[in-house]
Image: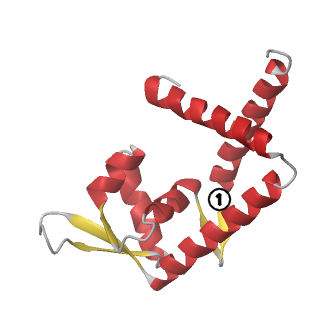
Amino acid sequence: MRNYYVQIQEYLEKLMQNIIILDKKGIKNNGDTLSMTEILILKSFGDEKEKKMSQILEEFEIDRNSFGTIINRLQSFNYIIKKKSDEDKRAQVLQLTEKGKSTFHQIVMKEKELLYSLLNDFTFNEEKAILKFLVKVDMLKKNNSSL
């Protein structure tokens, strides 16, 4: 079981480092450069027409100042619009624009293509082992917020 511990740890550290570097550099999309957080926020809409800002704040555990900056950038790139909620005039909601919807679908397709190409050489049992590992990593985050 511990045969590959050191190598797994090294590759996890490389993965985290690459994610941080990628987030700092940004990801190019139709001439715009988006951070990973901005992409995750766009993806969080899924098929929903609109989302409350407070809901996104809670989901991503972002401080209000950083969140405001992110939302302003997404608005300036014309990915989202901000408006008052029809149900509760005190609440602000975000909606994807047509450009935002198109970008959302592009991101989902690129992720699927990348994942399929990565998993193409794995057997069914290897995929199950990868999934089991990722579920355990996710459980660690939920059970221990000091990670």
**Residue for point 32% across, 71% down:** 50
The N terminus lies in which quarter of the figure?
top right
129 and 68: which is toward the camera: 129
22 and 147: which is toward the camera: 147
**Residue for point 65% across, 59% down:** 26
**Residue for point 79% across, 39% down:** 126
Left or right placement of residue 50 versus residue 42 in this view: left
Q: Give the residue type that dot 1 points to.
A: Gly
* Looking at the image, residue 66 lies above or below residue 70: above
Q: Secondary structure at mark 1?
A: loop
Image coloring type:
secondary structure
Where does label 1 land, which residue? 26
Left or right placement of residue 48 versus residue 10 in this view: left
**Residue for point 34% across, 51% down:** 57
Left or right placement of residue 114 versus residue 94 in this view: right
Q: Position of residue 101 (x, y in %)?
A: 49, 78
The number of numbered discs placed on residues in the rendered structure image is: 1
Q: Which quadrant holds residue 25?
A: bottom right
94 and 106: which is toward the camera: 106
Q: Position of residue 137 (x, y in %)?
A: 59, 31
Q: Position of residue 58 (x, y in %)?
A: 33, 47
Q: Which quadrant holds residue 27?
A: bottom right
Q: Position of residue 40 (x, y in %)?
A: 52, 57
* Looking at the image, residue 4 lies above or below residue 115: above
Task: Report the residue that reaches farthest toward the top.
Answer: 2
Left or right placement of residue 12 versus residue 43 in this view: right
Does residue 145 appear in the picture of this structure? no
126 and 41: which is toward the camera: 126
Mark 1 nearby-residue class (10 Å; few <14, some 14–19, many ≥20): some
* Looking at the image, residue 73 lies above or below residue 132: below
Does residue 118 appear in the picture of this structure? yes
